Image (cartoon, helix red, strand yellow):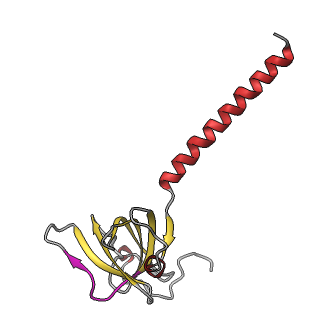
Amino acid sequence: MKAKHQRLILALVALGGVAGAGVLAASALRDEAAYFRTPAEVKAGKAEVGEAMRLGAMVAAGSIKRQSDGLTIDFVATDGKASIPVQFTGIVPDLFAENSGMVADGRMRADGVFVADRILAKHDERYMPPQMGEMPKNMKLVPGE
């Protein structure tokens, strides 16, 4: 076999390997991809049943209900335009509370309930961890400022 043919075969094998790696990477990303949606977008039909997504909203006042198992909570996520019932089983973050922001990873069920696998509580830039105690609000945390 001529050297020219050997190089051509080697190039084709390398191209096939790169294409195969690309297909594997794309299939792995497709399984992990989650679109960010708001309750208004979900109500408008932009989310399908079973689609992995992130729901970003505020926890509606008076909506948190704990079930008897001690781990499952039901609450309503709202963006001011629409509301979605959410169910989560697990331990919620310390900052999770009514009238606070949250982002939940999960999927919509056919009955219109968003089933969250994970909840992330959002806080503003003035957040002070409970371990810091009652520090003065105007205290500078970085020396020299």
Q: How many marks?
A: 0
Q: Write the residue at 51% across / 88% down.
A: 138
| Numbered range of the magenta stretch | 58-66
Report x, y in % for residue 128.
Answer: 43, 79
Residue 31 horizontal side relative to residue 74, left or right: right
Relative to 108, is 38 above or below? below
Magenta-span inclusion, residue 80: no
Relative to 111, is 13 above or below? above
Quick one: 47 or 98, which is closer to the camera? 47
Asked which quadrant contains residue 18, the reply is top right
Q: Write the residue at 24% across / 72% down.
A: 73
> Looking at the figure, which quarter contains the N terminus?
top right
Report x, y in % for residue 106.
Answer: 39, 64
Report x, y in % for residue 28.
Answer: 52, 47
Asked which quadrant contains residue 78, the reply is bottom left
Q: Write the residue at 70% across / 26% down.
A: 13
Magenta-span inclusion, residue 61: yes
Residue 111 horizontal side relative to residue 127, left or right: left
Report x, y in % for residue 65.
Answer: 22, 79
Name, please, the residue furthest toward the top.
1
Asked which quadrant contains residue 57, the reply is bottom left
> Looking at the figure, which quarter contains the C terminus?
bottom right
